[in-house]
Structures are given as C-alpha cells and as structure tokens.
Amino acid sequence: MTTIRRVLRVSAALCVVAIALVACTPTSPASPSRTLSAEHGSLSPERRTTIAEGVDAPWSIAFSGGAALISERDTARIVEVSDEGTLREVGVIGGVEPRGEGGLLGIAVHEGYLYAYSTTAEGNRVQRFALSGSPGSMEISGPETILSGLPAAGNHNGGRIAFGPDGMLYVTVGDAGDREGAQDVGSLAGKILRITPDGRVPEDNPFEGSPVFSLGHRNPQGLAWDEDGTMYASEFGQDTWDELNVIEPGGNYGWPAVEGIAQRDDFIDPVQQWAPDIASPSGIAIASGSIFIANLRGERLREVPLSDLRVSGEYFAEDAADSLGRLRDVVVAPDGALWILTNNTDGRGNPREGDDRVVRIPIG
C-alpha cells in the first residue's frame, strides 16, 4: 500500500501532463485518472434487460439460493423478485423510521440469515432475521439486533453491509453530521466497522475491543473485495471530491481534515476521486477484473479495472440516450451478470414510467 500511495502522489504531481477526468488546482490535486472508453470495457450495455419495475426507493440487493431480495428504504419492506419480474413482499422490518436518507438501507445474506441496516428513532442499527423458504416463498423471522447505537441523521447514514472473505460482517457508518467524530476512534461516526456474524468484536480488529476497522470517512456506501482479499470502498465527499478507497485495517482516510487526494503522510489517499456532480458513488461490485460503481447524482455506472486503479470508464451517462437515471446499487448475480438498482423515486430523481427498476447486464 505504501507503494500505491507513492505512485498516486507522483501521478497527481504530474497531472499537468495527464489526461485526467478533473482539472488540476494548486489547492486540490487532481485524481490521476485516465478515461477508459466504454467500447474497451467489460459490459455490452445494449444487451441489458429489465428484470422488474415498480420498486419503491430501493436501496440494496442480496441473493439467497437463487432468490433476489431487495430492500425498500421508505416502506421498510423486503421484497423478492420472481422469475417473471413480479415483486412479492417477504416482510416489513419493524421499528424503521425513514427520514431523509435514512430508513431501511443495506441488506446481506449469510448462513441462513438476512442481515439489515436500518434507521430507528434511537439511531441506526443492524439486525438479523432467520431466512427460510425457496425462491418464490422466502420468509424471514426474528429479529435479533446485533449492533445498535449507530449515529443517524437525515443524511450521511452510510448503510452498506457486506460479508468479507474472512466471514466477518463489515458495516459502513456515515458521520451523520458529526464531522469531528469521524476522527475519534471512540465514536462510531464516520467509520467502517467489522464484527462477527452475531455482533461481537473480533479479537484481531485493529483497535482492541472496538468494532472500528477504519476511520476518517464521511459517508461510505460501497464495499467489495477482489480475489486477493483487498477491500475497496466508495465514499461521498462534501462538495469537492467523491472517492474510491483501498481499505487498510486501522487506516485513516482523512475526513474532515481532508477531502480527496491530500498527499499527507498521516492519511490514506483515495485511488480515484471524482467531482460530486458526475459521481455520488453508492453500491459497488467486483467482477471480471473490474470494480463497478453505481452513481446517484452522476447517473452512470462506472468501471475501474483492477489492473490500473487510475483508469475509469462509464456507461449510461446522464446525457446518453440509454441513461437509467440515478443508480443506487450494483451486485453480481449467481449467473455472473450484473444487477443494477435505479433510484429515481428516492425524492431526488425524476421518476420515469416503470421506475424504479432492476436491470440485468451480462458481462463480456
């Protein structure tokens, strides 16, 4: 990682001769990104198909035994998508109080349980529910709260949960308006957390007795791992840079002291950064040697090849004829294709007929 950061800093310093996605300024070094044209990417956008329509402010997709489950932020419903594209209510998560960006957010499936991150009157929490049934008849029971007291607000709630290759549950928590808390290891604001499937603190966490895995985050909303176990996270900046980060145990990513590439030894720089108006990165997935990033405000799917983290290409740009609008999540389906959630009914988009949608795109 030291080598990666050194390369990035040298590249940023030489950005006057690089073909970058953003402009260099003396006070905010540009991302050393180069444009990867879509025709050289991994996807064939013209092969996309719509799996389902009419989903209400969807937030996250998870698969269980071939069944696709989706969380709806404001209704607090878990819905199952049938092979015919119809939506079936699996259950409603009790105690959820949607407000602003809060509500029922990320979900994950692991060893017979559905895990869900949601907003309540007392804060954000993670619960798990016994999951049973087969595709077309999935059911949840419970709940069991395994993590509570997470900071909540009308925005910056984080909310992505995912199981890593180590079998641990990783949880992204936004600063919820507590900017300084992001730098305080004793606070859960502005962190990525790591806990066991039943909510305990693993003994090998970087801070003894603490669920904190990394700190200095503003609003991380994407988590994924490559085949080597390297962890990546997407993060919303404030008004200067959104980020793609390589996550190290105990790493400090700078917020609120810095935003984007800072070239400071006490913080870890992002491997890419983008202006928020073309990004606002939420869910991410890794497939076929690339990181795929769902962008909300930027209304595009971005591809970053693992072979060169300074490069990115995009699909479905907001001004393109095939635009899908705001994109909240992207996941790899059991058949290896990408599934994408649009998010035009979340109060910030312009809903179209059929929104919100689940879209499938094959890779290759």
Image: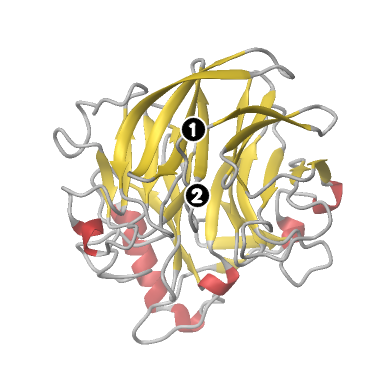
| Secondary structure of residue under mark 2 | loop
Spot occupied by residue 54 in the image (x, y as percentages of width and height) = 77, 46
Quarter holding the C terminus is top right
Residue that badge 1 annotates: 94
Nearer the observer, 81 or 192: 81
Q: Is residue 288 visible?
A: no
Three-letter amino acid code at disc 1? Gly
- Going by the image, does 296 lie left or right of 320? left
Q: Residue at x 36, y 51 (%)?
A: 152
Residue that badge 2 annotates: 98
The image quarter in which residue 76 lies: top right
Q: Vertically, is 356 above or below 299? A: above
- Going by the image, does 160 lie left or right of 70? left
Q: Residue at x 31, y 44 (%)?
A: 150
Q: Vertically, is 271 above or below 133? A: below
Nearer the observer, 118 or 195: 118
Three-letter amino acid code at disc 2? Pro
